Amino acid sequence: MIYDIGVVGLGVMGTNIAKNMSRNGFKVVTFDFFEDVRENRVNELKEEKVDIASSLENFIESLKKPRNILLLVKAGEVTDKTIERIAPYLEEGDTLIDGGNEQYENTRRRNMQLTEKGINFIGMGVSGGEEGALNGPSLMPGGQRQAYDNVSAILEKIAAKADDGKPCVTYIGEDGSGHYVKMIHNGIEYADMELIAESYYFMKHGLNMSNDEMSTVFDEWNRGDLNSYLIEITARILEFKDESGNYIIDLILDKAGQKGTGKWTGIEGLKLGIPLSLITDSVFVRCLSSLIEERALISEAYQSEMKSLSDDQKQSVLEDLKQALYISKLMSYSQGFRLLREASEIYGWNLQLGEISMIWRKGCIIRAQFLEEINRAYENDPALTNLLLDDYFRDVVSASHPSLRRIGIHAIENEIPMSAFLSALSYFDSMKQARVSSNMIQAQRDYFGAHTYERLDKPGVFHTEWQ
């Protein structure tokens, strides 16, 4: 049999995406370098009309030319070793697709190395987890345009479909751009999750609400402007009980894990000089959460004065919290898309920011209703530098930032930690100042290090003999 596409790596993601391809009418052959893994998947994949090759040679020989091979293996060294083993069997015009959660620099390097051999290489961000892989993920492929065109029919079929029927996949750009966009997606995801977690914590400790009450509120929010996958699952999490009738959320250790993509995003923001305060704060809160023993000692040394607000304030404060969450989410998206714009110019990728927002509407973790508004903003002004300058978002933020301020005041006065919310407010307040405090920093730098400065009243570079 001649197969349309091959999948290497039979973990959950590889297995599910192979099933997805087969269900959409494609002939799929798979392979894994570990024999026991192949044996464990035989019956499961046979039911889905997906074959498993017995050797790498048979796998390669059974593919249509030019060959299209999707790799779903562990990022980093494992991916490099997998490519080293497969590349000698490939011919000019064949395409390798890396669907792992890879650092974009590695993807750029591999693209360059394989291009020299005439082999195409696509680095493709895949969002949606194992469920998305099976039922329709959001896909972010970057690499040679010709290579994308060769596999676009398959990718468009297996991708999630938005409400208008459009597949949640588009050609992102050259070399590492697909994995770069996925990295920014994950950075925004970190901020989104932290803002929702802080909202939950504020309701629980600031408003003394029960899990069922909070679940109802998040469910209501999900029917309006805050409609999103993460809001939806938060409502479900809060109401879920174990077999003994205990709320699972109350039994989970408050130590958040991470795989590094949020950190990569923060590092990239520092590298390109674009502020990503919400994303980096969200990463640091996860780091803080892991310091459990240290937090326990400090909590004993400093008695917490965390207080709840009065019941008669609950409804008005909840409305403020809703508005504060919405515009804080907007701030994180505005930071993420600002970094995408900068990267597009620096790396020559010509990223279509509106199209990127549209492929995040379904299938991915940060899918949300207001992505439609982000696309509209970039359609209206393709040169838009910051979402805060768009008319729609300007109206929303102008009307709602007092709510964010009031939530910030409540948090500070009642000792409720809300790092991401306060970061959103600080970012907004700084960005709307035509003149900030950095003139003092320049003066200090010039004073102790003769680093010079520019002036408002005349052109040039200056130094003052301060002493």
Image (tube, grey):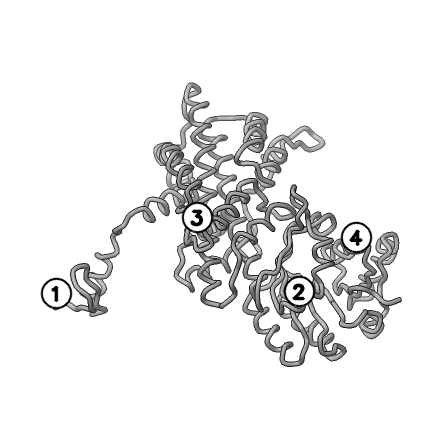
Tell me the mark number nearer the camera, choosing from 1 and 2. 2
Q: Which amino acid does label 4 sit on?
A: Asn
Q: Which of marks 4 and 2 is nearer the N terminus?
A: 4
The answer, for residue 304, to whether it is visible in the render is no
The residue at the point 80 percent across, 65 percent down is 31
Q: Earlier in the sequence, mark 2 or mark 3?
A: 2
Q: Earlier in the sequence, mark 3 or mark 4?
A: 4
Is 239 or 162 nearer to us in this picture? 162
Tell me the mark number nearer the camera, choosing from 1 and 4. 4
Q: Mark 4 points at which residue?
A: 24
Q: Name the residue under label 1.
A: 466
Which image quarter: residue 302? top left
Q: Which amino acid does label 2 sit on?
A: Tyr
Quadrant in which the N terminus is drawn? bottom right
Q: What element carries label 4?
A: loop
The residue at the point 64 percent across, 67 percent down is 122
Is 414 or 348 nearer to us in this picture? 348
